Amino acid sequence: MSDNKQSIEVTSRKRARHDESFREAREPCHCKNKCTEKLLDVEKEDIFKNFYNIPTKNEQDVFLQGLIVYKEIKRRRARKDGAQSKTNYFSYNVLVGSDRREVCRDAFFGLHGISSKCVKRIRRLLQGGCILEDQRRQPRSGNALKPSEVMSVIEHISLFPTKQTHCGACEHNYLDAELNVKIMHSLFLEKHPESKVKYEYYNKAFRENFNLSFGRP
């Protein structure tokens, strides 16, 4: 089989997996809060595409880690029926523009097109207070960012206040008109002077993970 034909087949398989995951992202979660029904179709599509466009497995995992919150529950009295009470729980969030919205576990899986196996690994590491690293055996680039640096960029962009506008059934989030990505990157470096994150990466993270514009029409 020629290299060109093999490349086309690999691309086709990836596209098929992408399309299947995207269909799952649009399915309702069936929980009592009806998480997915509260989201517009365009918001579901943005959540899925923004995650799918993150270039590496490592960065995807770090992004997901930032959306899952692990909380320990204070020890309670033993139940009379002898059943064990929960000692911890996880909450799940999605990014809609720059806003975090809490959703159920199944909605979190579906909207990002991921499996429970992926989240199980992240949950286990969160419980141990570990930083996520790509466990696949691949050579690490000397210029690759650390997981903590990737997460700090996502968190920094998320902290900027936004204003919403509505156009029919759609809504869009806008940052202050006096801002731009270069200014945001400069502010990031002021906050993290030891960071090696270049403007090109910061801009890429902004474009691929957030649906934001500057100023209001």
Image (cartoon, helix red, strand yellow):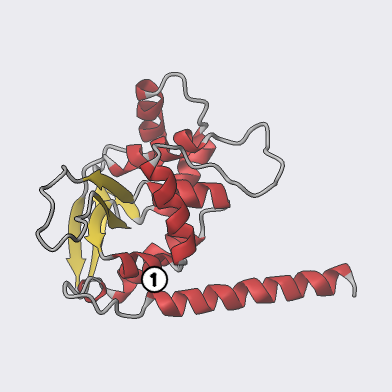
Q: Residue at x 55, y 35 (%)?
A: 145
**76 horizontally vs 63: left or right:** left
**106 horizontally vs 83: left or right:** right
- The kind of residue on which mark 1 rests is Gly
Q: Residue at x 16, y 42 (%)?
A: 74
Dot 1 corresponds to which residue?
110
Up/down of 85 relative to 62, above or below? below
For the C terminus, the quadrant is bottom left
The spot of residue 6 in percent (x, y) is 81, 72
Up/down of 196 relative to 43, above or below? above
**View extreme (right): residue:** 1
**Res. 203 in view:** yes
The spot of residue 88 in percent (x, y) is 25, 49
The spot of residue 67 in percent (x, y) is 33, 51
The number of numbered discs placed on residues in the rendered structure image is: 1
- Relative depth, front residue between 72 and 24: 72
Instruction: For label 1, count other residues whose C-alpha is less than 10 Å away and answer few (under 14), some (14-19) or many (20+).
Output: many
- Relative depth, front residue between 126 and 209: 126
**Res. 96 in view:** no
Up/down of 110 relative to 77, above or below? below
Q: Quadrant of residue 81?
A: bottom left
- Relative depth, front residue between 195 and 165: 195
**9 horizontally vs 134: left or right:** right
The spot of residue 15 in percent (x, y) is 61, 74
Q: Residue at x 22, y 75 (%)?
A: 31
Up/down of 196 relative to 86, above or below? above
For the N terminus, the quadrant is bottom right
